[in-house]
Each structure stands twice: as structure tokens, then as C-alpha cells.
Amino acid sequence: MKFDLLKVGVFLIGISLLIISSIIVLVYFKTLRYESIRSFTTAVCDYENNVIIIYAREDIKDVKIIDINNNTYCAFGYIKRQNNEICKINVSKSTIYLLIYDNNKKVVKCYKPKYIKPPPPTISD
């Protein structure tokens, strides 16, 4: 059995390039995921308790929650990184709110959760 060194060399170079590109893609996605989590600040509406929970993943300042009529519900001067704040709202008046912080704006939607009733069991012969 005779081996062609040129074919084996090209094959090994191809495998090594595949491994190197896989490592580069893995490092890229790990870095992208870390960056998105690190700078992620959001707010979630809890409809049943009439509150908006602000999750600060970074230090934020000049934080406000306003509704569509420009009524301010809460204002915080500063929220420290990895802390949360609770803002009491009136869901019966408005269902869309705006989180404003550090010259950024994010929309917060409040809606009543819909519970799906399972169908009644059927009796089959």
C-alpha cells in the first residue's frame, strides 16, 4: 500500500483549519454572550401585583418609569450594578410603560396572563 504524502498533508491541513475555525467561533460566541449579559438592563411587569421590577446589570442613574401619558410613577437617582428595584404602577390606567435611564429607553408591556384551559378528557372505547 502506497501513501501519497501530498494528499495526506492536504488532509491534515484541512483538519487543522477546521479545528482552529471551531475554536475561533466558540471564543467569539462566548465573548458575545458575556458582553450582552454584562450590559443588560431591563424591566419586567408583574401584572398581578401591579409592579415593574427593574433589573440593573450595570450601574445606572437617572432611572424613571413613565406611562404613555407622560406620568412618572417612579424615579431613582442611582441603581447599583446587580441590584433590582420595584416600582408600584396602576395597570388599570395604562399597559405600556417606558423605562428611561442614562439616556436609554426601553418599553415595558403589561398584560394579563392568559391561562389556557385544557380540554375535557374524552372517553374512547
Image: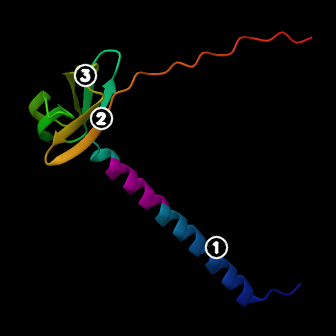
Q: Is residue 38 above or below residue 5?
A: above
Q: CA distance from mark 1 to mark 2?
A: 48 Å
Which sits in the foreground, 27 or 59? 59
Expressed as whole percent of the image width and height from the top left, the position of residue 32 reads 38, 55
Callout 3 amino acid: Lys
Disc assigned to residue 15? 1
- Give the residue number, with chain letter if any, for mark 2: 108
Q: Which residues are magenta?
A: 26-36
The kind of secondary structure element at disc 2 is strand
Disc assigned to residue 104? none
- Which quadrant holds the N terminus? bottom right
Q: Number of labelled discs?
A: 3
Residue 83 falls in which quadrant of the image? top left
Residue found at x 67% / y 84%: 10
Callout 2 amino acid: Val
Q: CA distance from mark 3 to mark 2?
A: 14 Å
The kind of secondary structure element at disc 1 is helix
The label nearer to you, 3 versus 2, is 3
Disc assigned to residue 93? 3
Q: Is residue 104 above or below residue 54?
A: below
Mark 3 or 1, nearer chain start: 1
Cβ atoms under marks 3 and 1 closer than 8 Å: no
Expressed as whole percent of the image width and height from the top left, the position of residue 85 reads 20, 26
In the displayed structure image, the side of residue 32 where residue 25 appears, left or right? right
Residue 27 falls in which quadrant of the image? bottom left
Callout 1 amino acid: Ile
The kind of secondary structure element at disc 3 is loop
Mark 3 or 2, nearer chain start: 3
